[in-house]
Amino acid sequence: MTGTRSPGEETAARRRLVVDAVAAADPSLPVDVVTGIVEAVNGAALRVLAAALAADPTALAVGAPTAVGRLVTALIAAGSTLPTPACALCGRVGAELIRDENGAGLCPRCRHRQLATACARCGIVKPVGGRDAHGQPVCARCSDRSQRRCGVCGALRRIGRRAHDGQPDVCVNCYRLPEAVCAVCGRRRPCAFADTDTPICKTCAPRRTAPCARCGQDRPPAARWPEGPVCDPCYTAALRHRGLCASCGTTRRLVHPPGPDATTCADCAGLPASHTCADCGIEDKLFTAGRCAPCALRHRSAALLAAGADQVPAALTGVHQAICAAANPYSALNWLRTGAAAGLLADLAAGRLATTHDALDAHPRRAAADYLRALLVAHQLLPARDDALARAEQRLTARLAAVDPPEHRRILTAYATWRVLRRLRRRAEHRRSPRTWTRYAETRVHVAIRFLGWLHDRGTALADLDQSTLDLWLTTTGPAAANIRDFLNWATDRDHTPALTVPTSRRRTGPATSENERIALLARLLHDDTLELTDRVAGALLLLYGQQLSRITALTTAQITQSGDTVHVQFGTDRVALPDPLDDHVLRLRAEGRPYTGLGAATTGWLFPGLLAGQPMTPSHLGARLRKLGVHATAGRRAALTHLASELPAAVLADLISLHPVTAARWTSDTGGTWNRYAAALVQDRNHQP
């Protein structure tokens, strides 16, 4: 094309060039049809189209640049057999394509990612979002954007919603979608299109799906890589997968050739290393601000504990290290973001909350305060205390303050202080379990309060109480009435009432798991590998040895010993040899530890650690877990004790599983075995060795 031609001749020449190129690429399409389509192209579009086909006639097969793609779309609509223009990387159709340096047609999104380079500010390889004052590339997160004063928080930030109709600017941090009833799930949630007839929440919003290039599942793509769209599970797995590079021999993330069979790292393949943590340099899935999850956790927890200072206070260093050592950094990050205890920790670090038990007791969020209390006690920021005993004292103080008349309050306060709580404190000083059980003690005080109220309603003074009145109370006020015995004994010792008799309550029995069901449950616990190891070991100890849940949760790793091939557990004075395969399960639990332990929990030595730092699992929680497997603690324990009592003498049973001798004798008697001749049989046994 020369400049001596007239404009009309130039246009005609360009059209002939395009028609000839189309005829060569698809001879099956009639020339007059092609001519009619090309005649509709004019101006700059025709110039670009002619120039692209003159430079590379194969551009029709690629479908790029945009003018060529539009022509191919029109030709296909007219019956052409040319391939549908699609992105060479992600396979997307319908998008206007751009030719890269290798001649491939890419959609704008893939071309944008193909041109990714290191951001001049954060250093992360990302698509270019803008340029700084020196013309250097910066990512979208770091690019300069106009900032204005937020009408909600007052900070100078990027605006997420512009001011309109009298409403102020709202920054990206303060903006929330308006609430409406979602047209899909029917729940009231923040929704897009809230002012229309079809509001939709974020969960129900449709997401475009595509077959994953790795697993083949039709899922929303998390990324579009050279091999094609990749779903989120495959995307995460690929970013965390490490292998031995075939070129340099180092263990790194392998990226070339594209796909799960990659053998070469980014450096050896001559590609920019992407998804590299800005702090530690590891190639991993990044969480925020160019940091991997562990580094983001370290950064955020340090910012929370520093409370605006340059570094974390020395007193909180242990807490910071415990948070950073969380087994699952994503859970820890979520706790820092939404956990109520994390908010209390921030208040404590900033000095808004005193580091005392009293301050935590007064906080309205009791669960959060208890969680933080355990964390602080585990790291010696608070002195250890018996929480069960402290709670019992608080509850009884509040309950007694409401007692009327005053003379009853005085007597009951003296009983609670010098009899009940004193006994609890003494028991707490010598206890071996991690908790002091206070329910029965509190029940005695509550029954005494009810009893004095009952006497007051009848117009009877405590000093005038007689046996007939007491018998009336015992026979008309329910099974808990007999718990008045301890109060009356105390009152008699102090001459508040004459000596009276309260009959001993009969030992209550209940249903027991049948022997066949016990054996079936044990078989499942011992051999079903789909069950969690914690539940398998705890359930087996209950069904084999009749151990209480409170004693199972209080087991420590020191109570598990191994002598050669034999594994022992010590419940009482004697060690119990564990049968196979329970011994392997116990050793594995001791070695691996229970999963899902609480955040910031230091090494405690508990075999069943709980969610509170330094504390074991609670019996109620363990009981709920076992009930889901069909193991009911009370019925299962009765069945186990019945079996053991029928096989062992009471003295052996008591020492073996830490039962009181009287209790062991009662169980043995209930099963019909007295073992009266046991000692004589041992004497006559020549093979017996004491």
Image (cartoon, helix red, strand yellow):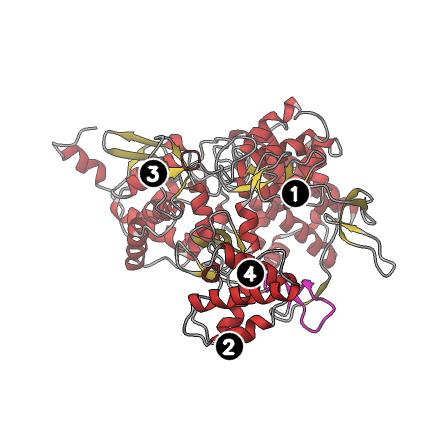
Badge 2: how crowded within 10 Å, few (<14), some, or many (20+)? some
> Could you tell me how far apart the alpha carbons at marks 3 and 4 are, in whole angstroms?
73 Å
Give the magenta-colored segment's residue range. Answer: 187-205
Q: Amino acid at mark 2?
A: Val
Task: Check disc 4 and report the residue beneath it.
Answer: 50
Give the CA separation, mark 4 to mark 2. 18 Å
Q: Amino acid at mark 3?
A: Arg
Of label 3 and label 4, which has the lower sequence position?
A: 4
2 or 3: tag closer to the N-terminus:
2
Of the numbered discs 3 and 1, the one sitting upstream in the chain is 1
Mark 3 Cα shell of 10 Å, populated few (<14), some (14-19), many (≥20): few
Residue type beneath disc 4: Ala
Sequence-wise, the earlier of marks 1 and 2 is 2
The residue wearing badge 1 is 141
- In this view, the residue in front, 482 or 109, is 109
* Contact (Cβ within 8 Å) of mark 3 with mark 1: no
Amino acid type, residue under disc 1 in the picture? Arg
- Closer to us: mark 4 or mark 1? 4
Q: CA distance from mark 1 to mark 2?
A: 49 Å
For the C terminus, the quadrant is top left
Residue at label 3? 588
Q: Residue furthest top?
A: 314
Q: Is residue 223 left or right of residue 350?
A: left
Q: Residue 537's x, y, as percent? A: 36, 44
Residue beneath the point at 50% across and 44% down:
618
Image location (x, y in percent) of residue 378: 56, 30
Q: CB of mark 2 within 8 Å of CB of mark 3?
A: no
- Mark carried by residue 33: 2
Q: Nearer the viewer, residue 540 or 309?
A: 309
| The residue positioned farthest toward the front in the image shown | 4
Q: Earlier in the sequence, mark 4 or mark 2?
A: 2
Confirm or deny contact between disc 4 and disc 1 (CB under 8 A): no
